[in-house]
Image (spheres, grey):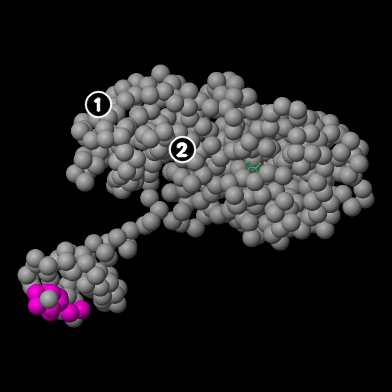
């Protein structure tokens, strides 16, 4: 009791710590330092047992060092680079696609200076920000016009709000999908102001279902790519060509929400077949929309491509202003699209395609190289082995197709879940956090996306020291 009182009396006052730390106030400002000192003293009081052995001056030193790290921690960005070893290449929670070098350079070049974003350098008049990417999109997708918004959810919202506000849109019950919890077709349709007319059933929808739903309040026909799931068995959906023909017989446009939307022939890269944006448009769609940061491998954005007359109406919709992208997104997107002009180089240059096309052999060799390195750090508590696994494309692209891969399976010698949980936690606390997955009582690192191997290895030492 007496020693506790003694100890609390030894705790320096806020003023005392402030006098000790003029360099901190000079750097961070008096108010912030004072606040950090108050929080630190509070922390010491709460955990006073941990400081019981410290003498007065030692306690002061401890407080100063705690205040310093608190200030540094508060100042650090919470958004940091991580290693995505989850096995999901396009991981929405981990920011989806990583940009290619050319895009990074372009972003850097435009971010810190004024740019001709909406300024035509030839005429000296106002320009359209879409001009920086529209021709490229048209060339790569074989369309007349295109516009870019914040993401594909915004793209769907803008298309429907422009073409169908206050009007009816028939959609197959098999396509009323939810993507990642926050994007649900029925809700986005409601938000856009159009009226959803459900047609067909969950597993089977026929052309006649659409035909019966069309009336003079119908605005367009909508087809949604069932991105993140597949129904098997007794199923039927209407082919794009038939849907396009029906829409056009009634003078209606066909809008297809492609979700991922890829611009290259996937089988040529040994990847599962998925129609390209250009193919979908050839089937007769008048407008398509797709994400910039899914299979395309670019920045977060939503691309709307199609008939000029329809795209012009979208550009003139006041909502476009609220959904538009900034100069950095356009800079990154234009460079990514330029890479698509030379498909032969694409798998080397575009990180997403590079990761998706990595050969299992290449990944296995890497796993065999890294297993002993990690084993050395984690011995004797854990055992490391090289193991086959399957990566996923992610972000709802190709939901049922997986890619053969290799990884490191790390199991706890004592077999406890607690040891695995602790390992996952210390991996997340590394300077560049490592995100793996826990699977069947083991910690698993799929190495498909490990491209900064030296950096990964260099920081493993800190893991052992915990
Ligand atoms: C992913 C996806 C969306 C949403 O796209 P974001 O770019 O994430 O906004 C919409 N529709 C489909 C079919 C999708 O797969």
The CA distance from mark 2 to mark 1 is 31 Å
Which quadrant of the figure has residue 245? top right
Residue 34, image x, y percentages: 26, 76
**Left or right: where 234 falls relative to 242:** left
SS type, badge 1? helix
| Disc 1 residue crowd, few under 14, some 14–19, many 20+, Cα 10 Å | some
Look at the image and tell me whether residue 296 can be seen: no
Does 12 appear in magenta?
Answer: yes
Q: What stretch is highlighted in magenta?
A: 2-14
Task: Examine the rendered structure and indicate whether residue 40 appears above or below residue 301.
Answer: below
Residue at position x 21%, y 65% in the image:
66
Q: Check disc 1 and report the residue beneath it.
A: 372
Does 94 appear in magenta?
Answer: no
Q: Nearer the viewer, residue 85 or 100?
A: 85
Q: Name the N-terminal-most of marks 2 and 1.
A: 2
Which quadrant of the figure has residue 144? top right
User: What secondary structure predominates along the stretch shown in magenta?
Assistant: helix
**Left or right: where 343 falls relative to 383:** right
SS type, badge 2? loop
Look at the image and tell me whether residue 290 can be seen: yes
Residue 374, image x, y percentages: 26, 32
Residue at position x 37%, y 21% in the image:
364
Q: Which of 281 and 333 is in front in this view?
A: 281
Residue 279, image x, y percentages: 71, 29
Q: Which of 205 and 380 is in front in this view?
A: 380
Q: Check disc 2 and report the residue beneath it.
A: 100
């Amino acid at each position: 009791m007496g020693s506790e009182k003694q100890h609390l009396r030894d705790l320096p006052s806020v003023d005392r710590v402030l006098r000790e730390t003029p360099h901190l106030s000079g750097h961070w400002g008096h108010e912030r330092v004072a606040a950090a000192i108050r929080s630190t003293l509070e922390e010491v009081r709460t955990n006073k047992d941990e400081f019981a052995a410290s003498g007065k001056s030692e306690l002061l030193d401890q407080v100063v060092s705690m205040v310093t790290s608190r200030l540094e921690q508060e100042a650090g960005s919470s958004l940091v680079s991580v290693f995505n070893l989850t096995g999901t290449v396009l991981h929405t929670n981990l920011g989806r696609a990583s940009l290619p070098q050319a895009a990074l350079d372009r972003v850097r070049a435009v971010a810190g200076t004024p740019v001709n974003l909406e300024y035509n350098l030839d005429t000296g008049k106002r320009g359209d920000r879409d001009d920086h990417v529209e021709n490229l999109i048209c060339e790569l997708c074989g369309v007349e016009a295109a516009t870019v918004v914040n993401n594909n959810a915004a793209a769907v919202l803008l298309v429907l709000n422009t073409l169908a506000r206050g009007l009816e849109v028939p959609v197959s019950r098999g396509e009323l999908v939810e993507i990642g919890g926050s994007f649900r077709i029925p809700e986005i349709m409601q938000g856009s102001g159009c009226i959803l007319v459900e047609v067909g059933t969950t597993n089977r929808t026929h052309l006649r279902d659409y035909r019966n739903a069309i009336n003079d309040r119908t605005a367009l026909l909508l087809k949604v790519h069932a991105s993140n799931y597949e129904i098997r068995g007794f199923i039927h959906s209407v082919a794009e060509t038939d849907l396009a023909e029906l829409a056009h017989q009634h003078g209606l446009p066909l809008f297809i929400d492609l979700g991922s939307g890829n611009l290259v022939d996937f089988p040529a890269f040994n990847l599962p077949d998925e129609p390209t944006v250009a193919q979908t448009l050839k089937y007769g769609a008048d407008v398509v929309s797709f994400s910039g940061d899914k299979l395309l491998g670019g920045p977060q954005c939503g691309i709307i491509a199609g008939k000029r007359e329809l795209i012009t109406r979208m550009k003139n919709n006041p909502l476009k202003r609220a959904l538009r992208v900034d100069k950095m997104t356009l800079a990154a997107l234009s460079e990514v699209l330029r890479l698509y002009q030379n498909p032969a180089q694409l798998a080397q240059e575009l990180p997403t395609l590079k990761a998706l096309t990595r050969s299992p052999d290449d990944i296995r060799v890497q796993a065999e190289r890294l297993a002993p390195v990690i084993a050395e750090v984690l011995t004797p508590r854990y055992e490391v082995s090289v193991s086959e696994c399957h990566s996923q494309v992610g972000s709802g692209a190709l939901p049922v197709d997986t890619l053969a891969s290799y990884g490191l399976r790390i199991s706890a010698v004592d077999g406890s879940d607690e040891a695995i949980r602790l390992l996952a936690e210390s991996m997340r606390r590394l300077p560049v956090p490592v995100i793996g997955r826990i699977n069947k009582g083991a910690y698993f690192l799929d190495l498909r996306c490990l491209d900064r191997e030296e950096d990964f290895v260099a920081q493993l030492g800190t893991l052992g020291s915990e």
